[in-house]
Amino acid sequence: MAKIAVLRVITAALLLLAAACAAPEQQTAAPSTPPATTTVPPPDPAAVGANELGVVPILMYHQLSRTPAGDYDQTPEKFRAELDRLLRENYRPITVSRYISGAIELPAGTHPVVLTFDDSTTSQLSFTAEGAPAADTAIAILEEFRGAHPEFGATATFFVNNEPFADDPRALPWLAAHGYEIGAHTATHANLGRLDSTGVQREFVQNLRAIAAATPNQPVRTMALPLGISPADHALVSAGSWDGTPYTFDAVLLVGAEPAPSPFGALDPTAIPRIRSGRAPVPFDSGYWLDQLAEHPERRYTCDGDPARISFPRALSTEITARWSPRSAPY
Ligand SMILES: [Zn+2]
């Protein structure tokens, strides 16, 4: 049994290499070869209802406040309650980079969820005099949750502007050192629909330069559009350059308003939907979609526990894209 599993991993790795050689333009987002260290074989995909072509909720948060002012803001208590619900319903967080690269290495039967925070405000991260995350910030809550529920593996992606977190120089290095992803959100939170092409590219490059100055060893691969608004030349959200500095993004996130497709199915990486989580229930928010996915579990991404294969019910066989079909494992 173990020999078969090892052979399967080697075969998948060779197929993946062949696919990478055949499609060099896709290498930037290709996953690394899955680890072949598992000694206990993962369970039968059918037994856990594996569906790695199912949808993934990407939740969008803004400010945490005891007195939330904006519709996109919420109380620390509501955020804690949402984490409790995600854990109870067997979700496990991954970063946007892991989602887009297909590196979803979670236990069998769990569901990936992506937690994203926009605008780099101090309600997400600020520090006590001793240098610890301040109480009731998003990071303090995530870290408490990580300690209380290590199996949840709390993580998130923070889309930041320039002078992030009230320009506290500790913030970005702290996020990078603690396993959180930093993504781009433009230098000035610009409405990109109102800028010319030079202005759009300047916003991205100035943002990336500021992030790189604080965290030089953590390349930025993902970006969320401020206000969800694309520039007139949509291609500039994926790649461009300004002042001699080129940029590329593997994943571009929108504002609304539905779960994201599986990374192994039909997905436009330049327009990935997110689900809002705010102070009060509104149509198509996180409460609505988590209810929907609980009622229709067959729509949800459910892991098979084996990063080397992509498991799904055979009826969905036409949905996997050619790039990922070498790892296809219908049942
Ligand atoms: Zn924003």
Image (cartoon, rainbow, N blue to C red):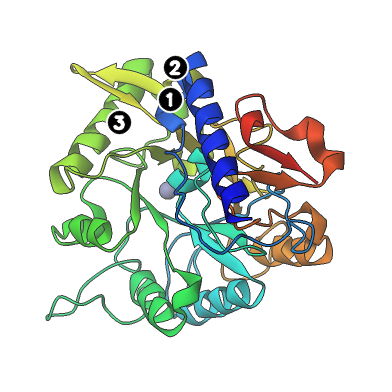
CA separation in Å, label 3 and label 2: 28 Å
Query: Marks 1 and 3: which is nearer the front?
Result: 1
Residue designated by label 2: 24
Q: Is mark 2 within 8 Å of ligand 1?
A: no
CA separation in Å, label 1 and label 3: 26 Å
Residue 69 image position (x, y, % from top left): 48, 68
Residue 303 image position (x, y, % from top left): 64, 56
Query: Marks 3 and 2: which is nearer the front?
Result: 2
Residue 102 image position (x, y, % from top left): 53, 42
CA separation in Å, label 2 and label 1: 5 Å
Circle 3/circle 2 CB separation < 8 Å: no
Q: Is residue 254 visible?
A: no
Residue designated by label 3: 203
Residue drawn at x 37%, y 16% as measured from the top left = 197
Amino acid type at mark 3: Glu
Amino acid type at mark 1: Gln
| Residue 27: mark in rendering | 1
Image quarter of the N terminus? bottom right
Circle 2/circle 1 CB separation < 8 Å: yes
Number of other residues with Cα within 10 Å of mark 1, as a class: few under 14, some 14 to 19, many 20 or more = some
Total numbered circles? 3
